[in-house]
Image (cartoon, coloured by chain):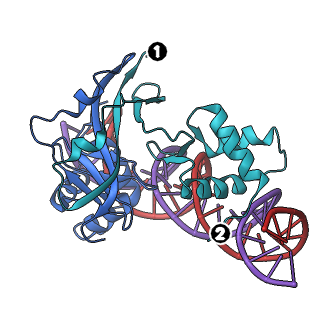
Chain colours: A cyan, B blue, C purple, D red
Amino acid sequence: MKYRYSPQRDLIYKKLKESKKHLTAEEIHKLVKKNDPQIGLGTVYRNLGILADQGMVQKLTLTDKALYEADDRPHHHLICKHCGSIKNVYAPANFKCVKCLEFVRDFKVDQAYINAYGRCSKC
Amino acid sequence: MKYRYSPQRDLIYKKLKESKKHLTAEEIHKLVKKNDPQIGLGTVYRNLGILADQGMVQKLTLTDKALYEADDRPHHHLICKHCGSIKNVYAPANFKCVKCLEFVRDFKVDQAYINAYGRCSKC
DNA sequence: GTGCATGCAAAACCTTTGCACCCCG
DNA sequence: CGGGGTGCAAAGGTTTTGCATGCAC
């Protein structure tokens, strides 16, 4: 299906990109409401779905509620088991995670990333 | 807190282990109801939480609903983008995923595993 | 003008929780 | 017998959806 331009979607993407964080749909809703007080939560969900479809944002289901981020550089996630914070880590250019799975048969790997659980510097 | 023995928990664990798959709480509920028709879904959730606490089952939040598995060998997940199936893959003994993150600072990595997205042999 | 997008609210859905009763230790 | 475990049902929280209206194209 073809997507039509929408100022709401534009705003959602811009705000998420600016924040440089992993945000829940509700946090994003709060953020965009500052610029567009009328925007509904349903609209936020719908547009996050579309943006994820287009590959412009990534939907993370690492915890009980979904998180969204707008960072297209390949990266991995460090999840603190104590405070629940999630931090991105960018691998050196010469490290390709997909190569770790070279031994895999019967499955065509497109993307691969690491989730690491542990303790962040604050905890 | 000390956990007391419970035949329901025993059954849940046994069934999940036997299945050798990733199951949702509801699928597990259906499975154990064959042996214990009275068991409630709440009990299944409570016991899966306890079993996860004890490290006997792993809770996966890779998709919109949580999946549970009973497989204590370290492994990675191959997620098919077409049919949504999730397959375990066991890395060679000499491959330690944690080593891929040796360059990480300000975070103590306990466990690390790879999620790979792509296409499975059936799709 | 056509039909996707929106705002609102209701619904759907997964998961947790309160409660009275049960039973393990 | 004390206190965790159970079944049931209701509540909680997140995400989706139906519908009338608005607006991009």
Q: Which residue is mark 2?
A: A2
Q: Which residue is mark 1?
A: A122
Nearer-the-camera pick, A107 or B114: A107
Where is residue B7? Give x, y as percent.
21, 53
Residue in view at x 31 percent, y 31 percent? A94
Q: Is residue A71 left or right of residue B110?
A: right
Q: Chain of mark 2?
A: A
Quick one: SS at disc 2?
Answer: loop
Q: Quadrant of residue B93?
A: top left
Nearer-the-camera pick, B10 or A68: A68
Amino acid type at mark 1 = Lys
Residue B5 seen anywhere in this rendered image of the structure: no
Q: Chain of mark 1?
A: A
Nearer-the-camera pick, B111 or B20: B111
Task: Sort mark 1 into few (<14), some (14-19) or many (20+) by Cα contacts within 10 Å.
Answer: few
Amino acid type at mark 2 = Lys
